[in-house]
Image (cartoon, grey):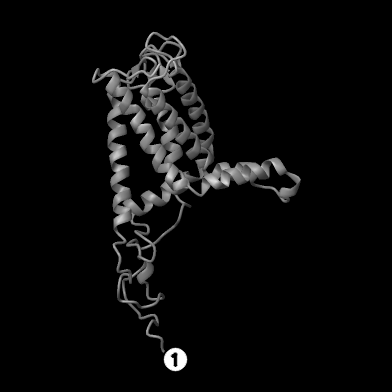
Amino acid sequence: MATGTEPAPQSGTRGVHDASRAAIPARHLRTDRWWLAPACTAAGLLAFIAYSTWRAFANADYYHAPYVSPFYSPCLAQNCAPMHGGPNWEIFGSWWGLSPALLILIFPLGFRLTCYYYRKAYYRGFWASPPACAVAEPHAKYTGETRFPLILQNIHRYFFYAAVLVACVLTYDTVLSFRDAHHAWGHMGLGTLVFLANIVLIWAYTLSCHSCRHIVGGRLRHFSKHPVRYRLWGWVGKLNERHMLLAWSSLISVAVADFYVFLLAAGVFDDPRFF
């Protein structure tokens, strides 16, 4: 019995419109504003890319005692601004003339670029692969992440290890934010709260990673024989349920922390002190 969706031979078509696929004339059957989500995603990512690129190449206004921008920490070049007790690690000597942020941002950005959620976000937002659920993608063929450059997505786990190290450094920076401008301990400013919120979100996003969940509870035959790892796997799983929310929240918080330090270093206002 005919169903009205039998394949109809079409010359010169490929992908979802190949002759072997069901012959549905409409591109999709969705009537909602399905394009809004990928459009907002693309706009949000473009805004962060533009801002982070400006700040990374600025090479200025990234330190105001006791705060250091998360874009520049740890500072790995000799041309870094001297930070009292801060993460100044002069691994790259005077020959490095570019912004020191370029030496460290590759690790957290690589972690986010290969993140499972962000892959979905920019695949849909920029490549329309696919643009939305139940909406055919315009590409003639799809090879997945089996060829260059997308095969590099498989190094996500190694970027996770680097992201953990960066998060540890940012935790140290947050501890240092409990000093005043003269490096005396036992003080708190508005910047301290900004740094605290940022590091909580950074850790929550990092630990909610799918690779972290696999590292904690993967390759086990019996959870009953590994109660500690099972408990940790459960905790990470609860974070993983909010991976998208944490991805965006931490992306915004790290930009806010950097912008706050920029405003202080540029002399726009003084950091309000609570005690």
Quadrant position of residue 108 = top left
Residue to which mark 1 is pinned = 1
Residue in front for this viewpoint, 46 or 10: 46
Q: Is residue 178 above or below residue 252?
A: above
Residue 60 coordinates in the image, percent (x, y): 29, 19
- Which amino acid, mark 1? Met
Q: Nearer the viewer, residue 16 or 45?
A: 45
Could you tell me which secondary element the residue under label 1 belongs to?
loop
* Residue 192, image x, y percentages: 41, 23
In this view of the protein, can residue 265 be seen by the observer?
yes
Q: Residues within 10 Å of mark 1 (few under 14, many from 20)?
A: few
Q: Which of 36 and 130 lies nearest the eye of the viewer?
A: 36
Q: Is residue 67 left or right of residue 268?
A: right
Please tell me in which quadrant of the rendered image residue 16 appears.
Answer: bottom left
Q: Residue at x 44, y 47 (%)?
A: 244
Residue 60 in sight: no
Residue at the image position 44 percent from the left and 22 percent from the top: 74
Q: Quadrant of the N terminus?
A: bottom left
- Taking the view exactly as shown, the residue that stands out farthest to the right is 225
Image position of 261 with respect to 136: above or below: above
* In front of the other: 167 or 189: 189
Count of numbered circles on the image:
1
Q: Quadrant of the C terminus?
A: top left
Q: Considering only vertical position in the picture, is 50 above or below 71?
A: below
**View extreme (left): residue:** 268
The image shows residue 256, relative to residue 228, as above or below, that is above
Identify the residue at the far bottom of this view. 1
* Percent of width and height locating residue 186: 46, 14
Residue 271 % position (x, y): 32, 19
